[in-house]
């Protein structure tokens, strides 16, 4: 039998632009053979590493601080939240938001096309490798924090690395009985398990094409995706740094921690990454099959598509080619290669990259790769599991604009910040920047960042790409800013969780509200500002967060963000109350998982950020942030 790997050719911009995500789901026909549906595992998530998990951010503690002329000010004292269990019954205005699209098929669209083509050609017995996501049965814990001012190999980090490895071993062992039982069932239809993952309940399987539809019919299958997909599709960085207002944070020497870039690899010898160094782990996740992807003989972590090198130079390039070409941060970067030399993206390498980043203590993970699957796919699940482990997770929105509903994967995942692209000079949305919403109706992108800048190239140790564009160029800008923001906030918010960073990022968008073109707007970091933030949990009624407004405030931006699972959407609203107790601004989206408001006329006194339950089920954790700009 012939072996088949799918590959989808997509258009390119100036660079090659890496593949994308869109979803489908169809019922099976009576003629399709069904696999056994029984697997005796409870749908309730099991916790297997609570004793090793990092502590969660505290509920109902209000944190605050300020920054003036690029310098932090001592934290401010704040009052406690007020909880009201009575539900607010005022009707919500009729929504103009587009309804969610039902999934057409568990099988990814391009894989479904292959099934049809092979059936028509009489080649349905050919073998194909696929990635299969199964219903989750294990709760991913928060991974331990590292001493982020030290290298990963420093003795002080040995305990964190050991704890991370212990969590990985427990997750691996906990999944093993389910994987073993399933492997026996799948053998009956000629299916071979090629790889199993610990971060998500997913496996790479090789099976006859004619068995794919029956596999998708299993009750425990969430998504069936191709292994290989896609292709990567003269302003200086000083201009985009100014637009984002990141230099004041850079000047505070916020260099702790590690950023993971899952991309096409990197030219390690480029001068922007050496003396001083900017790289830590450089891994080939395509051929390296271990938890850390691997290095050594037969592995190639180099950038052969002239893409990943540019991404990393935006994240953290040094000043060896002049201050104007410096990246946003001085933070060390892990490079995890997930593409082949032609720019095709391997889904299994993507998952290995997320696993390596989580296990290696990378608390910010970014990718400028895009695939076509939807928010319930294998890649999206891996990105969401990385969030659950404690990592801020960002991805490019995609380059399929200006049509609606063109969000790419993993940007369409529920717990990933999607980044659209604006021109660095005009600040106008690029026509190709994909528009939302996601297939399940959520607003996307979450924010936009600049693109069309000069970035390092992989063709020589001093080479440049004159115009690094696409949402590929915008995403590392947002990721670098997020890493600086996280480093600045961790001194004030103990056990900070990625959802807190998300709420801050949404509040930092320069739009008064949000839409499916700009999201919350162009990310603009706080400079002369005071901030209040925290985490709460709500199941009914409303919660008021008091904030003190002092001095001459030009505007207040407030935002909520909350994590959701696929099975349940909770509708949470946001109000801003003046010192008299009157609601003077509100945000009442139906489908979104974030809310944002702005008020430009303020008076001094105690204001309140109101988190308000509208509909849903269960207790919903919610992160909030309120920024006062002077």
Image (spheres, rainbow, N blue to C red):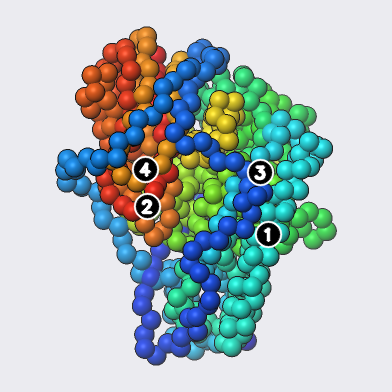
Depth-wise, is mark 1 or mark 4 nearer the camera? 4
Quadrant housing the C terminus: top left
Q: Name the residue under label 2.
A: 618
Residue under the image location 78 percent in, 54 percent down:
295
Name the element at disc 3.
Answer: loop
Q: How far apart are marks 1 and 2 (CA)?
A: 28 Å
Q: Mark 4 points at which residue?
A: 538
Label 3 or label 4, whichever comes before in sequence order: 3
Q: Name the residue under label 1.
A: 170
Mark 1 surroundings: few (<14), some (14-19) or many (≥20) residues within 10 A: some
Say which quarter of the image contains residue 206: bottom right
Name the element at disc 4.
Answer: strand
Mark 2 surroundings: few (<14), some (14-19) or many (≥20) residues within 10 A: few
Depth-wise, is mark 3 or mark 4 nearer the camera? 4
Name the element at disc 1.
Answer: helix
Mark 3 surroundings: few (<14), some (14-19) or many (≥20) residues within 10 A: many
Residue 144's mark? 3
Residue under the image location 32 percent in, 64 percent down:
102
Residue 275: image location, x then y, percent: 78, 29
């Amino acid at each position: 039998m012939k072996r088949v790997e799918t590959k989808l050719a997509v258009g390119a911009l100036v660079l090659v632009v890496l593949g994308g995500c869109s979803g489908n789901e169809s019922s099976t026909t009576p003629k399709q053979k069904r696999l056994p549906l029984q697997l005796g595992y409870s749908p309730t998530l099991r916790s297997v590493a609570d004793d090793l998990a990092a502590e969660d951010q505290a509920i109902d503690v209000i944190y605050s601080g300020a920054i003036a002329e690029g310098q932090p000010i001592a934290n401010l004292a704040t009052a406690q939240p007020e909880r009201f269990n009575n539900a607010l019954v005022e009707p919500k205005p009729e929504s103009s938001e587009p309804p969610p699209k039902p999934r057409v098929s568990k099988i990814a669209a391009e894989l479904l096309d292959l099934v049809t083509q092979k059936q028509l050609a009489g080649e349905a017995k050919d073998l194909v490798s696929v990635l299969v996501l199964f219903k989750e049965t294990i709760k991913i814990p928060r991974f331990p924090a590292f001493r982020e001012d030290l290298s990963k190999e420093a003795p002080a980090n040995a305990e964190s690395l050991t704890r991370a490895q212990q969590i990985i071993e427990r997750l691996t062992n906990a999944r093993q009985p389910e994987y073993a039982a399933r492997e026996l069932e799948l053998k009956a239809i000629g299916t071979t398990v090629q790889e199993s993952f610990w971060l998500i309940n997913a496996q790479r399987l090789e099976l006859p094409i004619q068995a794919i539809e029956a596999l998708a019919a299993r009750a425990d299958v969430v998504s069936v995706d191709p292994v290989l997909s896609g292709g990567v599709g003269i302003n200086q960085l000083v201009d985009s740094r100014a637009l984002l207002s990141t230099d004041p944070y850079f000047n505070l020497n916020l260099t702790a921690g590690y950023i993971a870039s899952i991309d096409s690899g990197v030219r390690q010898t480029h001068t922007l990454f050496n003396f001083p160094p900017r790289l830590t782990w450089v891994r080939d996740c395509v051929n390296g099959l271990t938890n850390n992807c691997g290095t050594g003989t037969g592995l190639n972590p180099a950038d052969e598509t002239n893409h990943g090198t540019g991404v990393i130079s935006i994240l953290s390039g040094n000043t060896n080619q002049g201050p104007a070409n410096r990246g946003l941060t001085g933070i060390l970067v892990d490079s995890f290669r997930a593409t082949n030399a032609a720019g095709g993206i391997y889904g299994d390498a993507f998952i290995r990259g997320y696993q390596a980043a989580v296990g290696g203590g990378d608390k910010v993970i970014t990718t400028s790769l895009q695939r076509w699957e939807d928010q319930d796919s294998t890649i999206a699940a891996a990105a969401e599991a990385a969030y659950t482990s404690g990592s801020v997770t960002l991805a490019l929105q995609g380059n399929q604009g200006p049509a609606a509903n063109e969000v790419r994967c993993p940007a369409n995942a529920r717990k990933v910040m999607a980044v659209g692209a604006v021109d660095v000079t005009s600040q106008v949305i690029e026509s190709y920047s994909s528009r939302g919403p996601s297939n399940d109706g959520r607003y996307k992108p979450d924010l936009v960042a600049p693109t069309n800048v000069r970035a390092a190239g992989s063709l020589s140790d001093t080479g440049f790409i004159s115009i690094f564009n696409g949402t590929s160029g915008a995403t590392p800008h947002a990721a670098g800013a997020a890493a600086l923001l996280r480093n600045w906030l961790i001194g004030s918010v103990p056990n900070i969780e990625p959802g807190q960073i998300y709420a801050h990022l949404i509040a930092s968008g320069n739009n008064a509200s949000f839409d499916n073109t700009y999201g919350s707007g162009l990310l603009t970091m706080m400079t002369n500002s005071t901030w209040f933030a925290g985490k709460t949990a709500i199941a009914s009624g409303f919660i008021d967060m008091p904030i003190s407004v002092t001095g001459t405030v030009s505007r207040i931006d407030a935002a909520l963000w909350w994590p959701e699972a696929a099975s349940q959407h909770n509708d949470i609203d946001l109000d801003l109350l003046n010192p008299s107790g009157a609601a003077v601004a509100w945000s009442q989206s139906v489908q979104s998982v974030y809310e944002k408001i702005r008020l430009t006329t303020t008076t001094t006194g105690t204001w309140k950020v109101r988190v308000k339950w509208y509909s849903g089920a269960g207790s919903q954790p919610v992160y909030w942030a309120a920024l006062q700009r002077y």
